[in-house]
Image (cartoon, coloured by chain):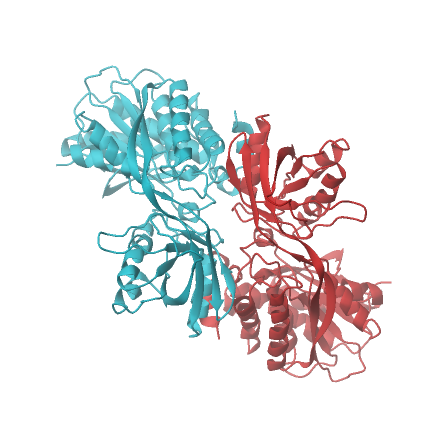
Chain colours: A cyan, B red
Amino acid sequence: MLRTLARVAVAAPFAFLSAHALAAPGEGRDVAWDILADLTTEVGPRLAGSEREAVARDWAVARLKALGFANVRSEPFTIPGWIRGAETAQLTAPYPQPLHITALGNSVATPAGGLTAELVYFASLDALKAAPDASLKGKVAFVDHAMRANQDGSGYGPFGQVRRAGPALASRKGAVAIVIRSVGTDSNRDPHTGVTGFPEGVAPIPAGAVSAPDAALIARIAATGKPVRIALVLEGHPVGPLPSGNVVADLPGRDPKLPPILVGCHLDSWDLGTGAIDDAAGCAIVAAAALRAQQGGKPLRTIRVLWAGSEENGGFGGVAYAKAHGAEPHALAMESDFGADRVWRLKFAFANGNQPLADRIAAALLPLGIVRNDERANGGTDVAPIITAQKLAVIDLEQDGTRYFDLHHTPDDTLDKVDPAQLEQNVAAWTAVLKIVADEAGPISGPN
Amino acid sequence: MLRTLARVAVAAPFAFLSAHALAAPGEGRDVAWDILADLTTEVGPRLAGSEREAVARDWAVARLKALGFANVRSEPFTIPGWIRGAETAQLTAPYPQPLHITALGNSVATPAGGLTAELVYFASLDALKAAPDASLKGKVAFVDHAMRANQDGSGYGPFGQVRRAGPALASRKGAVAIVIRSVGTDSNRDPHTGVTGFPEGVAPIPAGAVSAPDAALIARIAATGKPVRIALVLEGHPVGPLPSGNVVADLPGRDPKLPPILVGCHLDSWDLGTGAIDDAAGCAIVAAAALRAQQGGKPLRTIRVLWAGSEENGGFGGVAYAKAHGAEPHALAMESDFGADRVWRLKFAFANGNQPLADRIAAALLPLGIVRNDERANGGTDVAPIITAQKLAVIDLEQDGTRYFDLHHTPDDTLDKVDPAQLEQNVAAWTAVLKIVADEAGPISGPN
């Protein structure tokens, strides 16, 4: 019901794919857009463990039932909770400058009233690693980095380590807090959140990310050699166990004895934006494609949709799914969790005997502009545990990630960032794959 | 001193002009960058009337003296003050959604604890105008619009009326507050501030702007027909008179009896960003070009630099300059207040007898890619009062405004948005013009 206005709002620069150049839509076309628009509009931010994540689960169950899925159920589990609080930062010396900051997931709170301390600049995570033990005692570490946008998103692995490993490292060297340059590629003042972690025995410290322009400001000031001081309030902190859950639904195949095809995404989002690209779009794509694959005749195999909970804060949904369903055989798993820009690349993790099947899939996707790559597919966080447990076959349909890290984990992850034409190309690609694999009568399995 | 690191931080996409394709830099090249980098880094946000604006004036006097300007002085005046306060907004019905909001200058504060009221959607300012009198009693007006980016910035005139005139109009119809879609062209969650006004007899109301994605969300929800409610806290409010001032400096010409060339910009900025494109860049360009125009021999005429105070909240600096210097003859005025992307267009307001001079200037700029336009030049806010009072000749060097309103009046107006190569093209263009006009021995005057 929201589709007309929402489409008008899409930024023109990204509407470069003409919708009519893609596979004929049929009724499946609006399914994806409507899931995306309605989830982001009616539910909005849905932090793992929050009341809004629970609302999202109820919304998801109702929507999947309305779309004709069978066995729609919510599968509850419990997670270690974390909630956001007030978050502000200012440089107080040598020049007073307000900073735009956001806490990282699993950060602990600053003391009541905040803290003010010397800020020590590190150009990279390696520079922080090289700092002498205890050299940060009583100080705040700042870690910069050089992440740039790549189509394959490959910067997130190495540069994401600043967020994932930086806080524990700073704590080990005595820092009272850490501030990092956001793990992102944009240039606005909206910082990127995301999860960090503190291993057993490492004291958790307050950890936040500033936007890229703030990081550039800090770098310029640090380069003057003058002592830099920061006033920091980060009230986000862990809380006790909180309820979360997966939503699982089936489109039963003609042969219930054949192991199903599992397609995943995650329903939770970070709280700063409305989780449009991360990952309402993924849930929209997998559900719409599963439905469209029914057109022209029900496939042999069941297609199961997993809209996982609590991906962002540690992949708890995927673990819970593998635990709950580890005894049921599965054939193949896929996940969509990288936005909704066009699918440009295809990867497989197939048994040798399934190479002819892979060749047929690759041939079917080439007309959509999708090229095959020989690296091994790995699925995604929500399907990884069941893939590992059952050595499943995997297909990755990789979206163009050039602008993904402009938006990822920020307030800017909103509906207007999704181009309907590119979303439709995703659904068309997924449908083409599901049509083939769900009608495959022979065994499907992963590499040994 | 900050130049090396700052340059590295510039976003690559905008560095499309090769520096060596431009006029030979000489020592003038780094003058502009250093003014821009140092003012935004060492002073930062400098709201008119604030202590930081006073710091900026002191900084400016010191810098202009260090650069060799003569008669460098601060010329104080007083302005009606306005200060920002806490600002938050949430939709509370039909769906809870946090909004990103900022108060408009001259907004009054919401009642203690904020207000919660029905939000009434208007697709445009005309739709608000058409609402019956008193129909907004007890409600909050929301005004949307369709501003898009244009190279000449022409959207700002008509769509800026939503901000300039919308609040008074809503007040007249009984609204308890107004929220507008930011007057901007970006798609991130950083809203755009800017000044509004309430004429005599119109009760001031709290007035804020939400970001474009928030406006799109409100539009989608309003389109459902369900009643929308908003909770609003906008604590920004007018205060008593505050001190402000202009900084004026000269580069004396060979003939002190010839009326000077006046080049202006403004030193104050909105408080959300560091005022890099609005308008530290303008101050950097006019000062650097004035200095570079001395190379190869001091010109005939004095070049006077006006770094005006309090432009953003009502053009008080320009008025104060005209009042203080209205008895002194001037020859010609120019202003730079539209960022630092490349100058693409040139306009004149010249007496008929000065057309040969205009032709020489246009010919000198064509090699820099700058085309002549026949519309009349009008200067800018800071030089307009003296232009009007003395019927001065005017030249406009118009910058490419395609991305200006992505950044204008937002937290994103920061140093990293300025491309050094385009800044240098600005300085080169201004230098070429100043070389010609400051060496013109004959009379220079505006149209009758």
Residue A308 drawn at (x, y percent) = 32, 33
Residue B113 drawn at (x, y percent) = 59, 44
Q: Is A338 left, or right, of B237 in this rendering?
A: left
Identify the image quadrant of residue B375: bottom right
Q: Residue A54, can we see it?
A: yes
Q: Residue at x 59, y 42 (%)?
A: B232
Which is nearer the eye, A341 or A125?
A: A125
Residue A85 drawn at (x, y percent) = 43, 48
Which is nearer the eye, B18 or A164?
A: A164
Q: Is B42 left, or right, of A194 in this rendering?
A: right
Q: Residue A446, can we see it?
A: no
Which residue extends farthest left? A448
Which residue extends farthest right? B448
Which is nearer the eye, B280 or A327?
A: A327
Residue A258 drawn at (x, y percent) = 19, 20
Q: Which residue is drawn at 25% across and 29% down?
A: A360
Total marks placed: 0
Identify the image quadrant of residue A400: top left
Q: Is A228 left, or right, of A349 in this rendering?
A: right
In this rendering, the answer to whether A254 lies above or below A370 is above
In this rendering, the answer to whether B181 lies above or below B242 is above
Which is nearer the eye, A249 or A392?
A: A249
Q: In which quarter of the image is the C terminus of chain B?
A: bottom right
